[in-house]
Image (cartoon, rainbow, N blue to C red):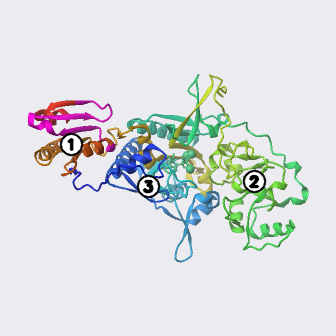
Amino acid sequence: MLLRMSNLFLRTLREDPADAEVPSHRLLVRGGFVRRAAPGVYSWLPLGKMVLDNIAAVVRDEMNRIGGQEVLLPALLPREYYDASGRWTEYGDSLFRLVDRKGADYALGPTHEELFTLLVKGEYSSYKDFPAILYQVQEKFRDEARPRAGVLRVREFHMKDSYSFDIDDEGLQRSYDLHRGAYIRIFDRLGLKYVIVSAMSGAMGGSASEEFLAETPTGEDTFVRSTGSAYAANVEAVRTPVPPALPLDGLPAAQVHHTPDTPTIATLVDHFNAAGLGRTFTAADTLKNVLVKTRAPGEAEWEVMGIGVPGDREVDFKRLEAALAPNEVELLDDADFAAHPFLVKGYVGPGALLQNKLRYLVDPRVVEGTRWVTGADKADHHVLDLVAGRDFTPDGTIEAAEVREGDPSPDGEGTLYTARGIEIGHIFQLGRKYADVFGLDALGPDGKPKRVTMGSYGVGVSRLVAAIVEQSHDDKGIVWPREVAPADVHVIGTGKGEQIEVALRIAGELEARGLRVLVDDRKGVSPGVKFTDAELLGIPTGLIVGKGLAQGVVELRDRASGERSEIPLDSAVDHVA
Ligand code: ATP
Ligand code: MG
Ligand code: MG
Ligand code: MG
């Protein structure tokens, strides 16, 4: 169906929105692609929705090509799933939480590892069922601390998330490589200039997690690249050395209370009371800033874990019990972190990060939320030695990069330089973390259960709309790559009568040839305004039916190059189609 500007639900704006800092924000709002509804929440208008759908179509195409099967899971998720994985607590303030009429807690899904794991567990049981790749294109919710830059960082956004399920490590590597290939094809088709960076420290060998960053000076992520090799990494992944062993021996003995088996609420309460912390605890109490020494079954090494929650949320005994099981635990104290001059392994929340006296070992991937550090996920854990004030800001975010321009590349080839980018995709080998939580097994050929191993992979579909504009615009407006543009051709009729009729006729013929056409058939709008709008909207090819009509010619305009040429009216359709 012809898109006619005379009745299209579109009003362009001449002025930039007051809060716009980056080009994509300015141009998407001015071009009537999106409208702000609330902080970090946007509505998609017809042209914006078309771009979004075009991007999603490319993503679906490439996901199907690697054998992905599309599903659609709910965004409204009961708390129990996130309790089981620990993320009800770990996710911190970024998780949107709500309560139903019966008082039950729910979350709006920020990402869906839990439910996908359960879904596969419900349907599949034999090694013959695997491998499997499931994906969805869905709205995600994250209560971002600082929504910014239009649709680049919002609180409700579209993500393609996929999950791979394999029975062994080689399978996981294959699924990961398939996704990596699919992402390369997706971003190539979208015409983006991007770099694939390691999102993990070099010591752990690069490929367990990689990010795709669209290169632009307005990007929030800083990455380093080597002048001498293909090495590229997010600066979060190339901070300082991996830490020494934890000096647990130095702990004051009086603060250590050992729970020999899996702790229960009752034993936890007893131990807290035995610690003589100046108050008496009951099972209904909540705690802040708990320190525990914990060790997974069969592990020799203890870890100290700080359990704190960003913001003012507290941990209750029930959650503590769920999170600690089946580990062996020693409770240290529930109080003042600053009093403990030892290392804490695991992120303990912004409040605790303020305590300058501690050196924290923090997983770079979890700076926005808390995360349990257990023996089970140690393998994919990279710890960093951070110092307050130097490595992170008072609110707990990490800002300053440790690496500097000119530092030697970790692979010894060349030196590093920094650049900025927008995270548009992220691929990640999860391993057995979620399969362990939910007991996802496949019966092997020998009849014995085998734990499934997983990967998770995200593409920021709505963020891509903005990332593309960041890379593809000029001072007059957007320059859409053809694959995502809302139309192939923008036919503009100037004047009042004949030109508009001819424009509509040509538009109809182009459409009959399979092109997507936007036609400016507005009456009483000056040619200047129409041309300005066309440049703002950024359709790749413009075809102007104007004054030249009397001489039997129309004008062709190429949005990207700015080239203009006159062609005979009679051959216009053949020429463009
Ligand atoms: P960021 O570092 O930008 O906060 P993330 O690492 O938290 O992103 P992931 O959990 O890896 O994001 O999610 C997969 C993809 O979803 C990201 O690569 C990004 O493209 C997109 N995305 C994440 N958060 C947002 C957001 N707030 N608004 C829009 N897109 C987002
Ligand atoms: Mg984030
Ligand atoms: Mg990130
Ligand atoms: Mg990410």
The one nearer the camera, 113 or 475, is 475
Query: Looking at the picture, which amino acid does disc 2 mark?
Result: Met
Q: Residues within 10 Å of mark 2 (few under 14, many from 20)?
A: many
Q: Residue at x 84, y 46 (%)?
A: 247
Residue under pointer 3 = 138
Q: Position of residue 55 (x, y in %)?
A: 38, 45
In the image, residue 112 above or below residue 484: below
Query: Looking at the picture, which amino acid does disc 1 mark?
Result: Val
- 556 to the left or right of 380: left
Q: Residue at x 45, y 59 (%)?
A: 73
- 195 to the left or right of 508: right
Q: Residue at x 22, y 50 (%)?
A: 525
- CA separation in Å, label 1 and label 3: 34 Å
Instruction: Label 1: state its secondary structure.
Output: strand
Q: Position of residue 161 (x, y in %)?
A: 48, 50
Q: Earlier in the sequence, mark 2 or mark 1?
A: 2
- CA separation in Å, label 2 and label 1: 63 Å
In the image, residue 535 above or below residue 293: above
Query: Looking at the picture, which amino acid does disc 3 mark?
Result: Gln
Q: Residues within 10 Å of mark 1 (few under 14, many from 20)?
A: many
Residue under pointer 2 = 305
Q: Tell me the number on the disc at residue 491.
A: 1
Instruction: Label 3: state its secondary structure.
Output: strand
In the image, residue 78 above or below residue 553: below
The magenta-colored residue range is: 536-564
Q: Quadrant of residue 493?
A: top left
Magenta segment includes 552: yes
